[in-house]
């Protein structure tokens, strides 16, 4: 007898929920994702849940070792370096694509994001600072008019966004404001039109984010 196809829309919803929970810190790196418990919590059967976990495994957010169940992926030092170095390449490529697309309206939109980020930092609103940080980079990607860049850059950032959030959390008010202000400095260099300086600033910005993760001791070797 032919088995019914899984409900893909339900699997999408489950994947979206689990992805958001991982990225917001509800589930920490290394936490077990027990299928029975999750199925009960989300009110779904095991079929869409397993499909959702398989998708998150493809995205690098979940690992499923044989006979050991699923758990939230940890971030090894090597993976951090690989993600960081690839992000540098993609972000610099995005800057090169901005020629002719960086309009006054685009500048104003990015400035509004930065202003809001600095205000959120002054109020020590970690969640909003993190959200606006992501909006800043996503807006730059959209300006490139390059769909595949947006997809790949988004997937790459998704792998480590919860680590970025966790690394910013220990910053005090001054440190959080300084983090927000680096986006103003980056925007100022982009506005200047000096592409080489903008690429260098973007590399420093991206690698500084990775260094915060390392300094916060958020990396660890994956268990076999």
Image (cartoon, helix red, strand yellow):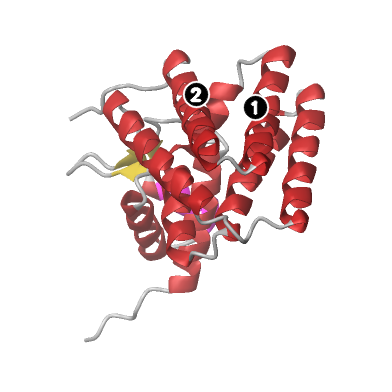
Q: Is residue 23 visible?
A: yes
On screen, residue 15 above or below 158: below
In the image, 109 versus 134, the foreground residue is: 109
Residue in the picture at 75% in, 29% down = 125
The image shows residue 108 at horizontal and vertical percentages of 79, 50
Quadrant (top left, top right, bottom left, bottom right) of the C terminus: top left
Q: Quadrant of residue 145?
A: bottom right
Quadrant (top left, top right, bottom left, bottom right) of the N terminus: bottom left
**Residue assigned mark 1:** 182
Q: Quadrant of residue 78?
A: top left
In the image, 115 versus 8, the foreground residue is: 115
The range drawn in magenta is 36-43
Residue in the picture at 45% in, 20% down = 211
Q: Secondary structure at mark 1?
A: helix
In the image, 165 versus 178, the foreground residue is: 178
Q: Residues within 10 Å of mark 1 (few under 14, many from 20)?
A: some
Q: Residues within 10 Å of mark 2 (few under 14, many from 20)?
A: some
Q: Earlier in the sequence, mark 2 or mark 1?
A: 1
Q: Is residue 38 magenta?
A: yes
Residue in the picture at 54% in, 26% down = 166
Whether residue 138 sits left or right of residue 62 in the image: it is right
**Residue assigned mark 2:** 208
């Amino acid at each position: 007898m032919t088995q019914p196809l899984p409900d893909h829309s339900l699997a999408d919803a489950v994947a979206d929920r689990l992805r958001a929970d991982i990225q917001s810190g509800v589930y920490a790196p290394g936490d077990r994702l027990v299928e029975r418990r999750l199925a009960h919590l989300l009110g779904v059967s095991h079929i869409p849940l397993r499909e959702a976990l398989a998708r998150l495994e493809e995205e690098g957010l979940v690992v499923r070792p044989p006979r050991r169940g699923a758990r939230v992926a940890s971030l090894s030092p090597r993976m951090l370096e690989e993600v960081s170095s690839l992000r540098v390449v993609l972000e610099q490529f995005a800057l090169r694509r901005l020629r002719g697309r960086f309009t006054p309206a685009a500048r104003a939109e990015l400035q509004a994001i930065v202003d809001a980020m600095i205000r959120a930092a002054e109020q020590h609103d970690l969640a909003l600072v993190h959200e606006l940080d992501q909006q800043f980079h996503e807006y730059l990607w959209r300006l490139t008019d390059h769909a595949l860049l947006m997809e790949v850059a988004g997937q790459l950032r998704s792998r480590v966004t919860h680590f970025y959030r966790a690394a910013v959390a220990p910053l005090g008010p001054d440190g959080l404001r300084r983090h927000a202000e680096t986006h103003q400095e980056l925007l100022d260099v982009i506005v200047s039109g000096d592409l080489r300086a903008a690429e260098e600033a973007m590399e420093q910005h991206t690698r500084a984010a990775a260094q915060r993760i390392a300094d916060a001791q958020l990396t660890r070797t994956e268990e076999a």
